[in-house]
Amino acid sequence: MSTQTNFGGNQVWQSRCYRPGSDQEVLDILARHREGHIRAMGGKHSWSASAVCSDVSLDMALFNEVQPYQDGGENRVRIGAGCTLQAALDRLQAETDQTLPTLGVIKRQTIAGAISTGTHGSGKPSLSHFVVSVRVAAYDRTGQPKIFDYGDGDELKASRCGLACTGVILSVDLRTVPKYNIEETVIPHKSLDDVLGRYRDYPLSQFSLIPYRWDYLVFERRELGRRTLSPREKFRALRFRVYNAVWVDRVIHWSVKWGALAGNWFVKNIVLRPAPYFFWMRGPRLDDAEHVLTMGHDLVQHEEMELFIPAPRLREAIEVLRCATQVFAGEEAPIAQDLKTKLDGLGLYEELLRNRGTYTLHYPLFFRRVLSDDTLISMTSSAQDDYYSAGIFTYYTPGNRDGYYAFCSWLARCMTRLVDARLHWGKHFPLGAADIARLYPRLETFKQLCTDTDPRGVFRNAYTERVLGLPMAPIA
């Protein structure tokens, strides 16, 4: 048995760990442990318990192939399940003029982990949406392990984002796009209307809401195609890379981590209220998409819950976020009567007041626009509207997050009931299947497909049982 710990330090478990190097080795493990439980691991960057398994863990790091190819004139790439996004991008960009169609912030994730939890960027669907086929090891109807190739239908849609419940992913084929540059400028705004108005010209933008000053900071981004940068543009791009790597990824995030320990006044007045001035290199800058859309915030341990809010409900959701942040931080800000009435109707108003002064949010709220996915259960699946994701972060150490968890629990229950928000499967997830089932119209189809290739629930764990309602069988 070996001990496994995720990046956030909030998930620790012991399991028998295998590192298979071939399809046949995976099938042999499935045959050997068909009466137990098996979960594949990626980069262990998830904060949810999606990878936790007390029986058998599969480290898929040796499945790291990257094979660009064309199919019917369309550029694609086959990526091994354990290959990191960084390694896939390096290989693609070294050998072709292609890149991935969207990028999450963190490149240390493996491709299987990224699609299984719906990893996304801003201004496009999640990475799962661009998957054209998946190879998985699972069980046939007689209980024998078998390789399945899913290239269409609901089986593909389920495997595109399936929390590893559809089988052990071996490889993933994705569409690719020509490399492209992005222009970015960081600009403060006072109103949400101003922020949303920028998306017409800057569709890849993301924005933050600064607690306690309640201003917006918008990272205005747009795609500019691909061209060779001038020497001056290259120099400026290099300056920004160094600035982000040193100042943003390290200095700012370590300052937040230590500042959170200094108390409420310090957090509000020294860490957050001056936050817009920390971004003194505001651009514009022009660089390739990888260096603009990704960052190294995984260098400093933290935890995040992410809410996916339907675009028409964003204003209402931000009102709730602001109210809850102020109350939990102990501020005496008034609560609008119509919001109080809504919270009363949900049975959440008195609970909110009981939590006054129990937690001070010490990091900006980050928002990204995510378009609809063609999947069964990703966070923007079956969506008629765009969604805006809202990230709620903490930089407290794992043993000091009780206040954060109470804050997230209240927010999650309020947001799912009030504005039909969905939670990111790979991040802090305080709800259960009964809380979220109505939000996913294709959930029962997904569960049936999982049962077809895994009737005993070998690929499930306590987390998937809790959030999806897929029961685990006891270990024989």
Image (cartoon, grey):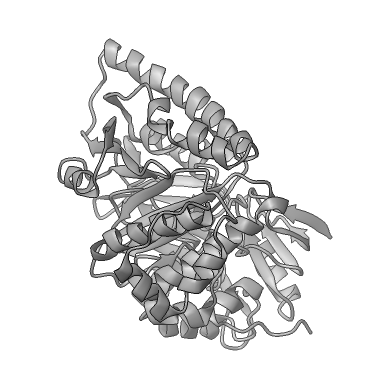
Relative image position of residue 158 (x, y in whole percent): 43, 72
Up the image or down, 265 lies above or below 173; here it is above
Relative image position of residue 86 (x, y in whole percent): 50, 39
Q: Residue at x 41, y 58 (%)?
A: 323
Q: Residue furthest top?
A: 231
Pick the front one: 431 or 84: 431
Pick the front one: 29 or 256: 256
Q: Quadrant of residue 39?
A: bottom right
Q: Residue at x 68, y 46 (%)?
A: 397
Q: Quadrant of residue 131?
A: bottom left
| Residue 468 visible in this rendered orientation of the protein | yes
Pick the front one: 203 or 232: 203
Pick the front one: 362 or 154: 362
Q: Residue at x 35, y 13 (%)?
A: 235
On-image quarter of the N terminus: bottom right
Q: Count of labels shown?
A: 0
Q: As drawn, is 405 to the left or to the right of 268? A: right
Relative image position of residue 386 (x, y in whole percent): 26, 61
On-image quarter of the C terminus: bottom right
Up the image or down, 472 lies above or below 300; here it is below
Q: Quadrant of residue 453?
A: bottom right
Relative image position of residue 51 (x, y in whole percent): 63, 62
Q: Residue furthest right?
A: 1
Q: Residue furthest bottom?
A: 142
Q: As drawn, is 27 to the left or to the right of 448? A: right
Q: Residue at x 40, y 75 (%)?
A: 417
Up the image or down, 190 lies above or below 252; here it is below
Up the image or down, 343 lies above or below 135; here it is below
| Residue 129 visible in this rendered orientation of the protein | no
